[in-house]
Amino acid sequence: MSLRTVPVTLAQACAFVQDWHRHHRPPRGHKFSIGAADQDGVLVGVAVVGRPIARMLDDGMTLEVTRVATDGTRNASSLLYAAAWQAARALGYRRLVTYTQDGESGASLRAAGWRIVATRPPAPGWSRPSRPRTDHGTAHIGRQRWHAPS
């Protein structure tokens, strides 16, 4: 099956994430989003790229792939990760990061040339006594941070 990248709005990307992402809700914002479409023009995946969630990475030259969701189409995730890095570089960014949870293989990232640069232990969640937050099922899970190829 032949895939190609297509432009998508944040609203389109969020709707796709809502329907297809395994464990995250749609993001609230982005710098840009990219879609993957099949030969008939049907959207089969999206990548949402925004500012890094981790404050220490938010240096003005780094972006984060905050969501990738596909309908299971083969190679769609790898295409989206590669396209996100190409677009970020074209915009002048020097680094692109993303995360996988423990138990996820990262095969799509490896296929796109990304590499693991850090392993993060499980976090207790975002809620604190001074600012309570609702847990959305992603707390208490270890993660790996990946960087796009240099």
Image (tube, helix red, strand yellow):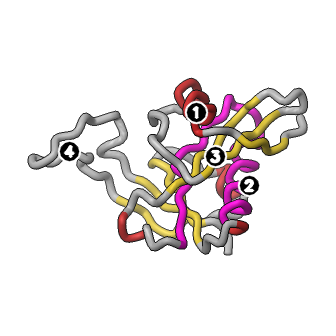
Q: Give SS at disc 3.
A: strand
Query: Element type at marker 1?
Result: helix
Residue located at (52% from left, 54% from top): 50
- In space, the residues marked 4 and 3 are separated at their CA atoms by 28 Å
Closer to the chain start, of discs 2 and 4, is: 2
Q: CA distance from mark 3 to mark 2?
A: 10 Å
C-alpha separation, residue under disc 3 versus residue under disc 1: 10 Å
Depth check, mark 4 against mark 1: the one in front is 1
Callout 3 touching callout 1 (CB < 8 Å): no
Whether residue 76 is in magenta: the answer is yes
From the viewer's perspective, tell me whether residue 39 is left or right of residue 64: right
| Whether residue 40 is situated above or below residue 68 in the rendered picture | above
Mark 3 or 2 closer to N-term? 3
> Residue 133: x percent and y percent?
22, 39
x and y percent of residue 115 in the render? 61, 66
Q: Which residue is at a point 36% across and 65% down the rendered structure image?
A: 55
Q: Spatial distance from mark 1 to mark 2, Cα to Cα?
A: 19 Å
Q: CA distance from mark 2 to mark 4?
A: 34 Å
Q: From this view, report whether residue 23 is shown above or below residue 109.
A: above
Q: Earlier in the sequence, mark 3 or mark 1?
A: 1
Is residue 65 magenta-colored?
Answer: yes
Residue under label 1, please give it. 11
Q: Earlier in the sequence, mark 4 or mark 3?
A: 3
Could you tell me residue 149's position as x and y percent? 67, 70
| Extent of the magenta region | 61-88
Residue marked by disc 4: 127
Please name the residue shown 75% across and 33% down the image. 73
Location of mark 3 (residue)? 33
Q: Which residue is mark 2?
A: 83
Q: Earlier in the sequence, mark 1 or mark 2?
A: 1
Q: Amino acid at mark 4?
A: Ser
